Image (cartoon, rainbow, N blue to C red):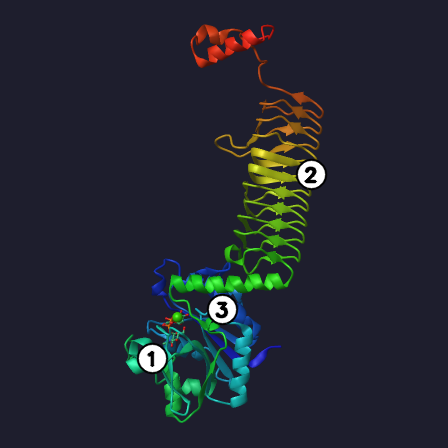
Amino acid sequence: MADTQLAIVVLAAGQGTRMKSATPKLLHPLAGVPMIGHVLATARALEAEHVIAVVRHERDRLVEVISAELPESVIVDQDEVPGTGRAVEQAVAAIPESFDGDVLVINGDVPLLDADTLATLLARHRAEGTAATLLSAILDDATGYGRIIRTADGTVDYIVEQKDASDAERAVAEINAGVYLFTVGALRQQLAKLTTDNAQGEKYVTDVVGLLRAEGLNVSALPVSEPWLVEGVNDRAQLSAQAARLNAMIIRGWQLAGVTIQDPSSTWIDVKATLAPDVTVKPGTQILGATAIATGAVVGPDTTLVDCEIGENAEVKRTDATLAVIGAGASVGPFSYLRPGTILGADGKIGTFVETKNARIGTGSKVPHLSYVGDAEIGEGSNIGAGSIFANYDGVKKHSSVVGSHVRTGSHGVFVAPVRIGDGAYTGAGTVVRKDIPAGALAISVAPQRNMPGWVEKNRPGTAAAEAALAAQDSNPHEEN
Ligand code: UD1
Ligand code: CA
């Protein structure tokens, strides 16, 4: 049910300079979703009456992602005045005057923040009736964060940023998590008083806390039980640390849901992937995008799947696959490369050193060794010989080929597209297929083999090959050359 007394402000206007990246900080992905997407997903769970996202740096790129992840968000463009305080000030100006509930402000760079933690914060704020309640954390290394300064009796007094803090203030281990609940009226009154009179020349939203206390209003800070839930991402070291924690949570979730994951430390699973009970994931495997794996399937070791669909009891080892569909009971790998549009039927096989692209391989059909299958359709129960190439490109255009059912092609065939091979047809080894083959025919295109007896002795006398040939004739004089 919608919470009509709640407005959420997501801060996404900062530049993220510490990332040293051409990609805006909040668009760097964790588990396949941009950082801001995680925060918006958490915000969505609270069903707030208003959601406002503040943007400035690379605003168009941010807006595209925000509108996709949470379409009901109202976008506010921050002006040239820098700082989180200015961002909140402009966001609050976009909330209707008539709104008299609570404003939840969330930094866009806390991707692991979860909805349960926010719900606890909201409940606490409403139960205590304070002007503001914020999340804090006790960190072993608080460097870089704003510190929560309390009076001797433990009351929250003010927040001081690292760059403005004295040595004594920097020694405080309780940090501001960048997640705040304000009563809208109290917030509105204080925002107008913010100045840029500090080490960074920015309006700090954190200064609202001290201003509220100066008015005699109460502020409380709620330390979270797991500090990493609220750790911010400012640089790439923090990004990988938070991504690893998120991955560990995702893996644990699937393990508890009945998936065997042999080596969590070398397995990566994106948030949008789904795995059925009794799937087995072997070491060194990345299950990315919206990949879906059905029960009984075994994936890995050393396999990367991007947006793939893996059928029941299929086996996929040492494989790189993108946008591929693998049927039930099928076998893929080791060392297979499945490009977009690969559809392998039930009980089919794509084997060692085989590359496929835009290839529909029917039920029980096999491409076992050293082949390229591009722009092709293969029927059911066919076997493509080792070392086959579907030559789909004439240098200008790509063409498609069709192979029927129960076809047997010899080793080292080339299928020069577009060609059609009828049901039950055979090809000899080394056939270059340039014309259609009717059903049931055997096609051969190589010249008959011709042996020239004694050629080596005559043309390569004295070589090891000639000696060996002579010795073979002596010990077996009746052998035909
Ligand atoms: C901020 C807090 C700090 C807290 C930390 C928690 C302030 C002044 N400091 O510091 O007390 O411990 O978060 O992680 O708020 N942003 C804007 N507009 C701006 C600047 C930033 O929207 O002008 C956004 C950023 O995109 C980001 C968030 O606000 O999502 C926080 O900005 P950041 O620069 O990372 O603040 P910190 O220095 O980490
Ligand atoms: Ca930050």
- SS class, disc 2: loop
Q: Quadrant of the N terminus?
A: bottom right
Asked if one can make out residue 170 in the rendered structure from this viewpoint, the answer is: yes
Question: Label 2 neighbourhood size at 10 Å, few (<14), some (14-19), many (20+)?
Answer: many
Q: Position of residue 107 (x, y in %)?
A: 43, 72
Q: Which residue is mark 2?
A: 364
Question: Label 1 neighbourhood size at 10 Å, few (<14), some (14-19), many (20+)?
Answer: few
Q: Residue at x 46, y 88 (%)?
A: 131
Specify the amino acid type for callout 3: Leu
- SS class, disc 3: loop
Horizontal side of 416 relative to 439 (left or right) equals left
- SS class, disc 1: loop
Above-or-below relation of 399 to 314:
above
Could you say which disc has been placed on residue 2 in the image?
none
Q: Residue at x 58, y 13 (%)?
A: 449
Q: Which residue is mark 3?
A: 112
Q: Which sits in the foreground, 445 or 231? A: 231
Q: Are marks 2 and 3 in contact (CB under 8 Å)?
A: no
Q: Which residue is mark 1?
A: 171
Specify the amino acid type for callout 2: Gly
Q: Quadrant of the C terminus?
A: top right
Horizontal side of 27 relative to 193 (left or right) equals right
Quarter of the view holding residue 180: bottom left
